[in-house]
C-alpha cells in the first residue's frame, strides 16, 4: 500500500473514530440490515463494549499499515478466535459491505472514490488474513476430532 493511501486511511480513521459510539452503532445497524441472522452472534454481547473493540481493531489495522508484520499475527489470532464465535467465511463479505456503507454514510459527499478504494483495499487485506487463519483453525479443529 502506498504512502498516500495510508495517509488517507489514517486521516479518515481519526475523523471516523471521533464519533466512536455513533460510528459503531451505525456499523452494526448496517450489518444487521444486510444480514439479520448475524444478530445471533451478538446475543450475549454488550454493544457498547463492541464499539470500543471495533474502533480498537480498526485503529490497530490503520496504525499498522506501515509495518504489516506487526499486525498480521494479531489479525490471525482474531480470525482464529472468530471461528469460536460462529463467524463463517461468508460473513466477512457482509462485514466489508457494512463497513464501506458506514463510512459512506459517515462521510457523505466527502467519501470519494479514492477513499472508498483505500478502505476497500485495506479491508481486503484484513479479511484475507483473518479468513486464512480461520481456515487453518477449522482444519485444526477437524483434524482433532
Image (spheres, helix red, strand yellow):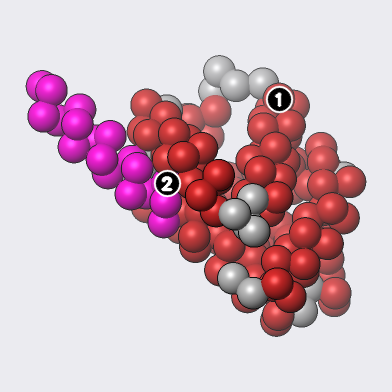
Q: Is residue 79 visible?
A: yes
Is 142 displayed left or right of 63 in the figure? Answer: left
Please tell me which of labels 1 and 2 falls first in the chain. 1
Q: Establish if 93 lies above or below 91.
A: below
Q: Residue at x 72, y 41 (%)?
A: 55
Q: Disc 2 on helix, strand or loop?
A: helix
User: How many residues crowd around disc 2 within 10 Å: few (fewer than 14), some, or many (20 or more)?
Assistant: many
User: How many residues crowd around disc 1 within 10 Å: few (fewer than 14), some, or many (20 or more)?
Assistant: few
Q: Which residue lies furthest to the bottom in this view?
A: 113
Viewport quadrant of the N terminus:
bottom right
Front in this rendered view, residue 116 or 47: 116
Label 1 vs label 2, nearer the camera: 2
Q: Residue at x 77, y 59 (%)?
A: 10
Mark number, residue 57: none
Is 74 displayed left or right of 145 in the figure? Answer: right
Q: Disc 1 on helix, strand or loop?
A: helix
Name the residue carrying label 1.
Answer: 49
Q: Position of residue 113 (x, y in %)?
A: 70, 81
Q: In which quarter of the image is residue 107?
A: bottom right
Name the residue carrying label 2.
Answer: 130
Front in this rendered view, residue 131 or 63: 63
CA–CA distance in space, label 1 to label 2? 21 Å
**Label 1 with label 2: CB-CB less than 8 Å:** no
Q: Position of residue 105 (x, y in %)?
A: 78, 63
Q: Residue at x 58, y 62 (%)?
A: 122
Q: What segment is highlighted magenta in the picture? A: 128-145
Q: Establish if 106 lies above or below 59.
A: below
Q: Where is residue 46 in the image (x, y as percent from the top left)?
A: 67, 21
Amino acid at each position: 500500500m502506498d504512502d498516500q493511501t495510508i495517509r488517507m486511511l489514517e486521516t479518515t480513521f481519526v475523523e471516523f473514530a471521533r464519533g466512536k459510539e455513533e460510528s459503531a452503532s451505525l456499523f452494526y445497524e448496517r450489518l444487521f440490515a444486510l444480514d439479520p441472522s448475524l444478530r445471533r452472534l451478538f446475543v450475549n454481547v454488550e454493544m457498547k463494549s463492541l464499539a470500543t473493540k471495533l474502533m480498537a481493531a480498526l485503529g490497530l489495522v490503520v496504525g499498522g499499515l506501515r509495518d504489516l508484520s506487526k499486525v498480521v499475527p494479531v489479525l490471525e489470532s482474531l480470525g482464529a478466535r472468530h471461528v469460536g464465535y460462529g463467524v463463517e467465511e461468508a460473513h466477512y463479505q457482509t462485514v466489508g459491505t457494512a463497513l464501506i456503507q458506514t463510512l459512506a454514510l459517515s462521510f457523505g459527499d466527502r467519501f470519494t472514490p479514492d477513499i472508498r478504494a483505500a478502505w476497500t483495499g485495506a479491508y481486503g487485506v484484513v479479511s484475507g488474513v483473518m479468513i486464512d487463519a480461520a481456515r487453518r483453525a477449522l482444519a485444526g479443529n477437524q483434524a482433532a476430532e
